[in-house]
Amino acid sequence: MKTIPFKNSYFDLGSAFYQSITPSSVRNPQLIVYNETLGDELGLAETALNASAGVSIFAGNQVPEGAAPLAMAYSGHQFGQFNPNLGDGRAILLGQIVTPSGHSKDLHLKGTGQTAFSRNGDGRAALGPVLREYLVSEAMARLGVPTTRALAAVTTGEKVIRDRVLPGAIITRVAASFVRIGTFEHFRARGDQASLLRLADYVIEHHYPDLKESVNPYLSLLESVIEGQASLIARWMQLGFIHGVMNTDNMSILCETIDYGPCAFLDHYTHDQVFSSIDHYGRYAYNNQPKIGLWNLSRFAECLLDLIDQDTAVAVDIAKDRLEGFVHSYQKHWLTGMRAKLGLHSEYDQDQGLIEELLDIMANDEADFTQTFYQLSSLGLEPSNDQLMLALFDDAEAITHWIAKWRQRLRHEGTADRERHTLMHQVNPAYIPRNHLIEAAIRAAEDSGDFSVFHALRQVLQKPYEHQPGAEAYLQPPQPHQIVHRTFCGT
Ligand code: AMP
Ligand code: MG
């Protein structure tokens, strides 16, 4: 058996950054799923982490050779309030591995028992949230959105107590890094400038090596994270994704979607949609996500001020300027992506108005977000077979008028129907992890130990942009009785 290529660079940062800890064992671990494609990509085939051979590792019952497990320390702004004492309360970083393509990846187990950061939590995860994170993170990857990945999930054979007694589970996830904005805030709050510098150097060294050459690498780091988050959040918006808990401790320095909790996708389009049961004031509503992204990035910029310039006033001015850049960058990414969703590749001033008009009509007529763009992708330049599209809207009048305008605009593109259909279907998914489909997968697993619904959904979501004969049920918006109104983080 090959050894797992651990290098444990985070461990080398020293004990201010984490608590060294061995995962607690569980009674009877059983494999739910192993992501073979990802495992192979990471070079884990023929190692102790391969499929069923890895169950005891995925369950935390065995620490793989070469790993130096630890719970990362961090702080963070939760719903706008600073909490200085967070950290991995129920997750353990096994270490960094080097993939065959030379990239460093963090291997993380979530649900492996209490750590120094657990406060009153049990350090465990319930099956439902584990299945949700597996499905949504892997779907995001296939949709082309930067995200942590899911390598495996196991049941523990133990119960966890939430509002009721639930089966316990553990997910193994993989990220470029689990360093968050909150990790930087942790050292800033403690006035530990030396550790802050070590952290920034670590991130640059391992994840943004090109920045080492720049005149001011720390400013370049801020710029890169601003740009990466602008692009990421634009991708979320284009897919109708709502993260649900955009606390600064849930925002990656590597600009991947991390910490899937009460996340959800829009069904019918509502610009200020909230699903999360803990988001009482709509802070993390769909349309607030870009604004919150900027707010979080401002907290990140504060951490870097002393590294950007010794003169704080100068550093503040520079940081403000770059943060203003977020708005332009986000807008550019959003507009480019939305144009593509409409089949537009040339740029006209009125495009933004055309996009916004469509969104307004969708909101008024309760049109399904994903289906609207999916059906639009099959419309021709000449009116014919428009019924499937029109049927998505409560009232056909406004959308009929809009489609006529859109067809006018398409005449400036000069693309043939077939070519445009292909391009549009590459950006407008047929299948997303719809809330009611996830709910059905969780119900079957939780209530009757039946994972077939989960596996079937997982399969469909591997090819979100391809029409899959026989998978029609997965295209459909929920029936009224299937609508999920609230999602829970399940912690
Ligand atoms: P989250 O909302 O998942 O981002 O979690 C916020 C913080 O609470 C993180 O520091 C988690 O590690 C911690 N936490 C969440 N759930 C638990 C749990 N069941 N036991 C211990 N800590 C937890
Ligand atoms: Mg978190």
Image (tube, helix red, strand yellow):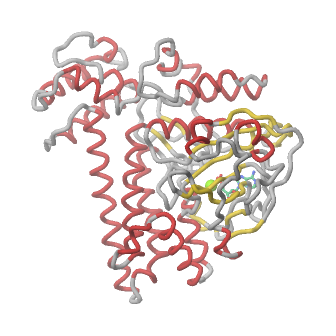
Where, by quadrant of the figure, is residue 196 drawn? bottom right
Q: Is residue 289 left or right of residue 183?
A: left
The percent position of residue 28, horizontal first and vertical second, equals 87, 38
What percent of the width, then of the height, locates residue 257? 51, 49
Q: Is residue 80 left or right of residue 297?
A: right
Furthest-front residue in view? 1
| Picture coordinates of residue 127, whole percent (x, y) | 74, 37
Ligand 2's quadrant: bottom right
Query: Which residue is rendered at x = 78% and y = 43% of the image?
Result: 162
> Picture quarter containing residue 21?
bottom right
Q: Nearer the viewer, residue 269 or 185?
A: 185
Please tell me which residue lies in front, 334 or 10: 10
**Does 324 sit above or below residue 15?**
above
Relative to 458, does residue 99 appear above or below in the rendering? below
Query: Looking at the image, is 193 positioned above or below residue 6?
Result: below
Give the residue at x 60% y 49%: 174
The structure residue drawn at horizontal position 54% and vertical position 38%, both measured from the top left corner, is: 264
The answer to which of 310 and 285 lies nearer the viewer is 310
Q: Is residue 141 above or below residue 21?
A: above
Along the line of sight, which residue is nearer the eye, 186 or 43? Answer: 43
Residue shown at 64% from the left, 25% from the top: 455
Expressed as whole percent of the image width and height from the top left, the position of residue 322 reads: 33, 69
Left or right placement of residue 388 versus residue 259 in this view? left
